[in-house]
Structure formats: C-alpha cells, structure tokens
Image: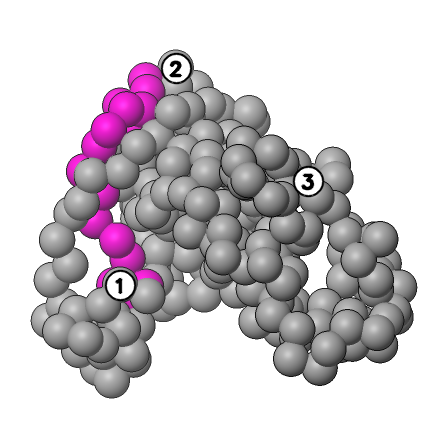
Amino acid sequence: MDVCRAVRRRLVAGGAPKRVKVGHGGTLDPLATGVLVVLVGKATRLCDRVMSGDKRYVAEVDLSAFTTTDDREGERTEVNVSSPPTREALDRACAEFVGTVMQRPPVYSAIKIDGRRAYDLARRGRADDLVIPARPVRIDRVSVEEYRWPLARLVIDCGKGVYIRSLARDLGALLGTGGTLASLRRTRVGDWSIEEARTIESLPETLTQYELIPIPAPLVPDQPPTM
C-alpha cells in the first residue's frame, strides 16, 4: 500500500481526482523485492484476475538452518549437517515439489484462523499452538540455478497462493537439512515481467494517463481500462 500511495500522489499531481482508485495485484513479503502490478481507476476491478496469474520467483534458500518465520527474519535454529547434499540430490528433491502439491502456509502469514490473521496470533505468543492445515497449490517449475553449500538459488514458476517460504522449509525437511528463505525476488506476474518494471524512485513526480500501460486484451474482453 505504500507503493499505491506513492503512485496516487503522483497521479493527483498530474491532474487525477484526489480519490482516484489505486490498487495492487498481489502483495510481497517485506523481505521480497520485484514485480508489483499497480492498478489504476477501472483497472482495480481486475485485481483478482491479476492475482490469479502465474508468477515467477528467484529464491535463495539457506539449507543450514530453520527459523520461526521460515525466512531470515525469524529466530534461527542451526541444523548440524555432517554431509551436505549433492547437486544431484538437490535437483531430485526440487522435482518432488512440481505439480499440485499439499503445502502448509507459514505460521507467520496472512492466513485467517477464526477470523484472525495467523501472524497476529503468532505475535501474541500463540505460534506453538497454531495449526494451519495444508492446502493444494500448483507449482510448475523448481529448478536449481546455482548451488554453493549452504545456499541454493532456485527459479520457481507457480500459481496463486504458493508460499516460497514454505517451499524453502519443506525442501530442507525433505533433504534432511535446514530450510530458510534467505532472499526472494518476484520476476513475473502474469503478462508483466521485471524487464518492464520501474522503481518508485524512477517515476516522475507527476503521472498522467498517457504514461500508464494498457491492460492486456485477454484480461479485459470488453473495454480495456489502464494500469
């Protein structure tokens, strides 16, 4: 929402109504960087369609430890690994997560439990009591781009609802090592890739409709709004 507010301020400076609608097509964890699709005006109605699009991530996984949050921001527990897995073993383990798989979201996540966000309950000291059931998710690709113990850089193509933190945790459990998400970059959301993206800092202080990108036709069969 910080990004949405920054875009709205620039749009208003460019002549848009003060209440111009600005939304996004899927959040990123605070740890993560990369593509965030920002929707403007009538395009905000397409939020669910954008969020349901396929995504690509580049993730760095630390196989030497687990953490309470499944990423580097949590309390760390080192794992004594006497013999690190080979590249071949890592490749085989990654292949186990391709397809429709059951995945348990992290305890520190936005999943709702009895109407409350899981991370709110966890921060109130209930992390050990939380039971978040596994759910089916679709993962199309998990490939190893680089591996130097204890770090493995993975490229993941997946559908909506996949937690890369959970994938890191489960990969470590399968290998008999640790599994912590050390870094994450989203490089594609649907039709939008990192190559097309702009940083907030690079945006002009005034934005007009002529500087917005039209939504691809398949998303809007009738009258295409802009984003």
| Pointer 3 residue | 194
Label 2 residue SS: helix
Secondary element type, mark 3: helix
Choose between 125 and 7: the one closer to the eye: 7
Is residue 158 on the magenta stretch? no
Q: Residue most toward the front?
A: 222
Q: Residue at x 60, y 70 (%)?
A: 21
- Look at mark 1 in the image and give the residue it sits on: 111
Q: Which residue is mark 2?
A: 88
Q: Is residue 114 visible?
A: yes
Residue type of the residue flagged with mark 1: Ile
Q: Is residue 53 left or right of residue 209?
A: left
Task: Look at the numbered discs 2 and 1 and tell me whether their residues touch, using CB distance below 8 Å.
Answer: no
Nearer the N terminus, badge 3 or badge 1? 1
Q: Give the mark nearer the N terminus: 3 vs 2.
A: 2
Image coordinates for residue 10, horizontal then vertical, percent: 80, 72
201 vs 152: above or below: below
Q: Vertical placement of 101 versus 45: above or below?
A: above
Residue displayed at 26% across by 53% down: 105
Give the residue at x 41% y 24%.
141
